[in-house]
Amino acid sequence: MIGAMIIAVDGSAASGKGTLSKRLADYFSLAHLDTGSLFRALALQLLNAGTEIDIIDEIQVIEESAKLDLGLCSVPEIRTDKVGSLASKVAILPEVRTNLLTLQRNFANNPPHGNGAVLDGRDIGSVVVPETPIKLFIDAKLEVRAERRFKELLHAGHSVIFRQVLAEMRKRDQRDRNRSVAPLRAAGGAKIIDTSTMDADKVFAVALDHVKHIVGT
Ligand code: DC
């Protein structure tokens, strides 16, 4: 393969795309960007500034997205369902997407280390780096994903109710799939992997096989 390797991994919430992306990055010595953490960081920045989850001031959201505090991408608070939900609401705004797009493209084209980059998100293969030939789309049944998220949240010490996690995930799916700008969908040429009945090792094996096939090794 000529040039740096860029792997685009898109998929629904709790589909297993994050785990897979980290493993691919380790395997090929690539830098990894979880692009959802940018949208989550923006959501947390807004909550810290006093935003109410149901009352969104678009002007304020756009202004905050232009001065995103990247330090927030690594704080544990961004992993709550409240932050995920607000992240998917602000991700609908075209100006927000444009502001965060620059950061994502810079990372893909000038990764901080390694031989290239793995980016995971919702529109990586379709919008952020449509030129890469290596695209994966990871999905699983809603109930399976809600169960995974429920266990993750319990494990992290949050007190959660399964029914609420399921309802929240259903709403987030609808927003991510139906928004007019960069909706969640498999990019042309993406390898679609349904992880409903697969463990992480199996998902990695299927994905690796596809990547090697594309790069010709
Ligand atoms: O992958 P995640 O659950 O951490 O993402 C949180 C939200 O951020 C998701 O519901 C929609 C938004 N997002 C997006 O619109 N585009 C991306 N590339 C990544 C995330």
Image (cartoon, grey):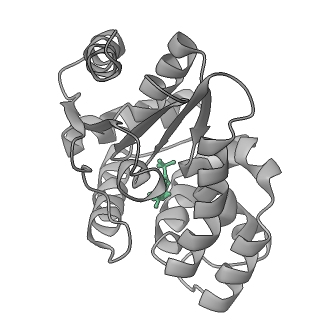
Write the residue at 59% across / 29% down. 116
Residue in front for this viewpoint, 56 or 111: 111
Write the residue at 66% across / 81% down. 62
Residue 161 pos. (x, y %): 40, 46
- Residue 115 versus residue 9 in the image, above or below: above
* Left or right: where 191 falls relative to 23: left
- Residue 41 versus residue 174 in the image, above or below: above
Residue 205 pos. (x, y %): 30, 11
Q: Is residue 150 visible?
A: no
- Residue 57 versus residue 158 in the image, above or below: below
Residue 24 pos. (x, y %): 47, 19
Quadrant of image for the N terminus: top left
- Residue 157 versus residue 197 in the image, above or below: below
* Left or right: where 213 falls relative to 91: left
Quadrant of image for the C terminus: top left
Write the residue at 19% across / 29% down. 196
